[in-house]
Image (spheres, helix red, strand yellow):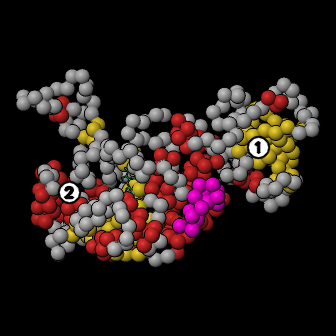
Amino acid sequence: MANKYPPRIKDLLALPASGAEVEASGWVRTRRDGKGFSFFEVNDGSCLSGIQVVVPGTLGNYEPQLARVNTGSSVRVRGTLADSPGQGQKYEILAAEVFVYGMSPPDYPLQKKKHSFEYLREIAHLRPRTNTIGAVARLRSGLSCAVHTFFQERGFYYVHTPIITASDAEGAGEMFRVSTLDPQDIPKTEDGRADYSKDFFGKPANLTVSGQLEGEAYAMAMGRVYTFGPTFRAENSNTARHLAEFWMIEPEAAFFRLTDDMDLAEDFIRSLCAHVLEHNRDDLEFFNKHISPSVIQNIECAATQKFERISYTEAVNLLLTSGNSFQFPVSWGADLQSEHERCLTEQIFKKPVIVHDYPKEIKAFYMRQNDDGKTVGAMDILVPGIGELVGGSEREDRADVLVARMRECGLDDRKYSWYLDLRRYGGAPHAGFGLGFERLLLFVTGMQNIRDVIPFPRYPGSAEF
Ligand code: 4AD
Ligand code: MG
């Protein structure tokens, strides 16, 4: 089947022996001229390495065309696959024909030199042609597939939860409004407020912050489900760990308690790490060499070591006695800041850490209250270099306790009546978590900024492309 389509460089490099007549197409990364020959380094995105094409000056179209082929040009090459005398490359192509699809003038923004990631963000439409962003894209694709395989093999059904929703799943009010009302001429009710009954959905609607609530509805019918889709948060966090649009994986499973949930999340991360170690070795070695020297070690650790599990209370005590001076003070009841999370996972345990049973005041309304009256059955997974990678919990399945908690949180329980039905009619224990896909990519690439692990990042002040 593979032969049906134009060949890829990855497949050529995997051929068992040289000698065959081959074809390759791609973009020229560099060009060098020698005596009677030119050398084009051609990359087609199929793998990190490109292939060197040896172009004799005697080819019919050498003058004037091939003599001008430059970085960024696109070509199709036909020729003989030969063992390469050069270091670090297995084969090269001795060209018998080079067809130029498109020339690239000298103002091509990706010249052969190191560009900053900030600069590359400004040319996000061209940056996948760089080694780093290309490798990120291959990892994203491979990991997406591994996510589905993991859940499908364990009896989880993929559910497509809505992107437009009227419920605030996190109760945090950080949502983007979806409306067709004319902002210059908003219809008003008698008391002067915006009249959303005239809006497209007849009520305020938003982009989803999480598919969890709808996921719960399906878990309470199908047993085990998961979502994997785009998620939107209008929090104004201009950090290297937050995006306004990111992808989240959210499994939800009936009859799972908090321990099952932690086991599932740990297995999941372990399996994704094992996947990239097995399938993306070249790209990982590139990241380890050029981006972060501890990335492979961190992935191997997550793939093989048992994660540490500690309660929030234990975490607070460890932080208080760690001898560190933090920017944000540590005290029981305060949320763990990124610096605290990283201290736990990077300094104290040097491996992924699951922190569980947080104070209810700092967690979402839907988490199951513990008998102590102070904490909820929540769990976060912290990993080196990132901090929080996963947030999850057992869900409050007692209707009366949930309603009381919603009211304490200032939420209008009438707006969540369908969600409460899941408790009224055959309510049962269930649990789930959310894993931020871009945070996972930060972990497996060692990249420093989350804006560089999603193709076209959205963040405060930026929705280019
Ligand atoms: O901890 P969070 O807010 O949990 C939820 O949304 C739950 N509904 C999940 C569930 O139980 N089904 O978000 C989950 C994860 C975080 O741990 C983080 O990895 C990621 O989503 N995340 C973000 N990633 C990028 N940019 C942001 N603004 C993010 N906010 C959360
Ligand atoms: Mg969280």
Provide the secondary structure element on which disc 1 rests.
strand
* Residue under numbered circle 1: 41
Horizontally, residue 383 falls left or right of residue 393, namely: right
* Residue under numbered circle 2: 419
Disc 1 + disc 2, Cβ < 8 Å: no
Name the main secondary structure of what is drawn in magenta. helix
28 or 250, which is in the foreground?
A: 28
* Residue 296 colored in magenta in the image: yes
Asked if 404 appears above or below 179 in the picture, the reply is below
Q: Amino acid at mark 1?
A: Glu
Provide the secondary structure element on which disc 2 rests.
helix
**Residue 208, percent across and down?**
31, 47
Residue under the image location 32 percent in, 53 percent down: 211
161 or 170, which is in the foreground?
A: 170
* Displayed quadrant of residue 458: top left
Residue 31's disc number: none
350 or 322, which is in the foreground?
A: 322
**Residue 168, percent across and down?**
24, 49
Whether residue 103 appears in this view of the structure is yes
Asked if 227 appears above or below 257 in the picture, the reply is above
Residue under the image location 58 percent in, 47 percent down: 133
**Residue 193, percent across and down?**
12, 32
| Magenta extent | 285-298
Q: Amino acid at mark 2?
A: Tyr
**Residue 64, percent across and down?**
84, 25
For marks 1 and 2, the one nearer the N-term is: 1
